[in-house]
Amino acid sequence: MRFLRPFSVAFAAAVMLFAGLAAAQQPIKVGIGIAQTGPLGGGGKAALLALNMWVDDVNAKGGLLGRKVQLISYDDQSNPGTTPGIYTKLLDVDKVDLIIAPYGTNPTAPIMPLVKQRDLLLMGNFSFDVNAQIKHDKWFNNAPWGAGAVAWGATFLEAGKALGGKTVAFMAADAEFAQNLATGSRQIAKAMGLQTVYDQNYPPNTVDFSSMIRAVRNAKPDILFVASYPGESAAIVRAVNEIGVGPSVKLIGGGMVGLQFAPIMEALGPLLNGFVNYNSYVPEKSLDNPGIRDFLAKYRPRAVQEKVDPLGFYLPPYNYAIGQMLEQAVTATKSLDHKVLADYIRKNEMKTIVGNIRYDAVGEWAKPMVVMAQFRGVQGKDLEQFRQAGKQVIIAPASMKTGEVLPYDKARK
Amino acid sequence: MDLQLLFEATVSGVLLGCFYAAVSLGLSIAFGLLDVPHIAHPSFLVLGAFGAYVLGGYGIDPLVAGLLLMPVFFVFGLGVYQFYYATFERRGTDTGLRGLAFFFGVAFIVEVGLILAFGVDQRMVEAPYIGESLEIGEMRLPYRMLVAFGMAVVLMAVLSVYLSRTFTGRAIKAVAQDEGALRLMGVDPVRVKRIAFGLATAVTAVTGALLIIVGPVEPGLGRIYIGRTFCVVVLAGLGSVPGTVVAGLILGIAESIVLSTAGAAWAPAVSFGILLMVLAVRPAGLFGR
Amino acid sequence: MDAGTRRFIVGAIVFLALVYGLTRLVSNEYVFFATYVVLQFIVLATAWNILGGYAGYVNFGSGAFFAVGAYTGVALFKAFEAPILVQVVAGATMSGLLGLAVGALSLRLRGIFFSIATVAVAIVIETAVVNTPYLGGAKGLPILRPAPPAMFQSYLEFVFFVMAVLAVIAVFCARYVETSWIGRGLRAIRDNEGAAECSGVPTLKLKLFAATLSGALMGAAGAPFAQYLSFIEPTSVFNLNYAVSALAMPIIGGMSHWMGPVIGAVLLGTVQQLVTVTISSELNVLVVGVLLVLFVVAAPDGILGLVRKLRRPRAPAASIGAKA
């Protein structure tokens, strides 16, 4: 009987070892529901590619905590109605360990109550003020604008004022992101003492902007702030070039989504010259670092292969950065516990290819870094020219400036 | 409101309206004359637009591309109608609804096919007349809209002449009026309808090219044009091809004027509100049979 | 009450008891989210079929009726913290009135004009909602769910149960319409409206009734949506998917009997939910498209029609001039 005890101890140890090994073979699952079709599909596909690249890079280095990382993703069809179903499937059926939010504000909003109720860590993905009402303490949004619309409105309108502008016109699409931008910017304009001479929302999917631009020209504004979606941004740029906004306008642009996407940049070419628009990354010196250069070089061939945005300036670096943040937090705390991870992210500086990020109390970037860049010297319809510095000169914020803003008329040439 | 602004908005509206009329012409034939619930028409438009995009990659002007694709689309239309007739019209009952569901299915399949082939991004074409405008005093008229306008007028004229002067054209109008009588006169109505549908599809090749000339196109754009094109055709009155231009003009001008005023966000409500009012007062449409 | 109705009511009670049991036993929330959508489509498809299948008038703007119900619920919740039953009744009323209005406008004409009118109405209402800041406009409105009532563990489960009850009510209404003189009249209208009118069928009144009932049920289906999603915004409620699904499900299931839309909704709804979380991509839309084409071509009377054909023994060939 005496050898029974050491035998059982050995047996128990062996069982635990095997169980531990089995658990270690189990991959760490990261779940996301992200648009692959619908209006947000173009951005979503590029973002998902970047996330997959992060997963490949992490696994090449040996995984997280010795385990491989597996990304489970579903298409939310740009429809907020699908997200609660998708995320409960990820959490309750696929049993993911970590979750990342969908691309965009509206698809994320429906899952905020769910996430708060279950006290989960959620990495936000280019959304706007989604946590403002719920105030979940484990939410960290990766978007360069921080809380509120100050990051765009203020920098853009200040540049306008610096050029001598006193009146402003607003054009905004009747869609979520554009409306949020416009609302915030209207307040900022008032606070700055600018006079609003034209302020119109337009229906999404408007085909022809000739009459609207004509009306804007009639109002003779100094600054034209446009908050538009990809479908209309191209049409508006064309209309501005064709109809003209009049000699009074010194600054156009601000919040035009779509002018960061390669297919649109390529198709519009020189029509873009003079527009000042927000971006999250442009290939200028002040934003350059070896990490992002490396990322873009690896991204390019895969993007062409998968038929997504070949430049990869707008969303992809940020999604890769989300992966990096999760990697840093998990590796530093050696834990997958959401509370521990959230505490770490709240208290520490996260080092990513889009910069070093610190989060404020509501889970937004403490220091916004929205770049306002002016298109200059774009010639012909060549996409490669956008990879070099000088085509999108950063005119704000002051810490990242690579050039002074030129009035629209001068910059067009 | 500023009179100059109103005048210019009206002119823009005329150009836009002719564009709407042009893209609805194929539907005017398929649905207006043949009673086929062709809800896949906007998807065919997008297909034509992508055809022009592909040929544009070889340096072919989009309008020329559209014209080149016409015979291909004609044959495609013949095939689609043959299948539709064999499966639905011959069987008789409930054709409208099942035909509708069938065309919905076709529209979705075309959309997904385009996504798989081209991805979800927007595509644009280039031509010397895109991006420039004609200056008349203070007014600027974009050339691409003038091209759309010109094309619509030409198509309209050609179709009108075809439908009233040629034998097949008159047979098409006849089959819309009274199929039985046509059969008694020794003409095979099915053959006539097939040709008409092929013609309608061929028209979408060119008008699809117009679509991508006027603005960027992505595979899901068809859904947005379902409402617009049916609105034009119903407003015109089923069976009236010239009415399509008038209806398109009304909608284009209304939209253009509203966009230049303080209520720009209400433009779609105005257009479809007009349709509802016309339906209430004169259900056959403006020129309907 | 005849035997058929008694059996139906018993079946309904059993079904609801099962649903309630589900809420107590299952803790996997995904089941509730996914099944809610299927139940919702049962209501929508059944509602659509009352006008579309029984009477032959195709509603193309089901999204609008659904959305009116949803936004009525939201408005009442925001203004008075109204309980969900009030929201449902109010949503049903508003959408019913909408159905009546659209019907009065266009049901006098050929069926196709009713369909176009529904499209136009859908776009007008969507524009109105987008421009109403009180309802959230284009930005949408987050909704904080209240605490659940005593018998339920979470508000989501309560809403889920409400939707199951609505499904039963919708099917009950459809069954009643189908088996009563109203259904006979609607079938007469569908087969030949002119002849029906000549035979004394009050066609306009029946059509208006069907349109109102159809709209009301769709509004009822929409009212709990904001509570389900904890959020409401225009693009998810005015989605073309509702219009297409409400049409496709009765076609696939069979339009002449109340079971058809239920079968179609369960089949297509489940397939859609599964595809969303498995192959999940642009292929979702392809699946719907292919299913539509397949069923419409191969099974013109839907699944019920197929079942009927399989069950009926082959009739001996009869020739017209045969000897008596």
Image (cartoon, grey):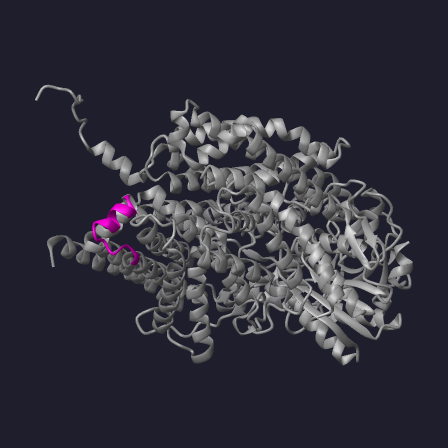
Q: Is residue B2 left or right of residue B229?
A: right
Q: Decide which of A61, A364 is in the foreground and name it.
A: A364
How many marks can you see? Answer: 0
Question: Is the N terminus of chain B in the top left, top right, bottom left or bottom right quadrant?
Answer: bottom right
Residues in magenta, as a range: C192-204
Q: Is residue C221 magenta?
A: no
Residue sitting at x 40%, y 32%: B179
Q: Is residue B251 left or right of residue B126?
A: left
> Which quadrant would residue C308 be assigned to in this image?
top left
Q: Is residue B89 left or right of residue A383?
A: left
Q: Is residue A12 left or right of residue B154?
A: left
From the image, give the main secondary structure of the stretch colored magenta: helix
Q: Is residue C193 magenta?
A: yes
In this picture, is B261 found above or below C54? below
> Residue C252's spot in the image, x, y percent?
35, 42
> Residue A274's spot in the image, x, y percent?
85, 57
Q: Residue furthest left?
A: C324
> Residue C24's spot in the image, x, y percent?
31, 63
> Which quadrant would residue A408 be assigned to in this image?
bottom right
> Which quadrant would residue C83 be assigned to in this image?
bottom left
Q: Decide which of A147, B267 is in the foreground and name it.
A: B267
In this picture, is A239 found above or below C94? above
Q: Decide which of A40, B132 is in the foreground and name it.
A: B132
**Is residue B173 among what the camera can see?**
yes
Residue sitting at x 49%, y 71%: C143
**Is residue B219 among what the camera can see?**
no
> Residue C323's spot in the image, x, y percent?
9, 19
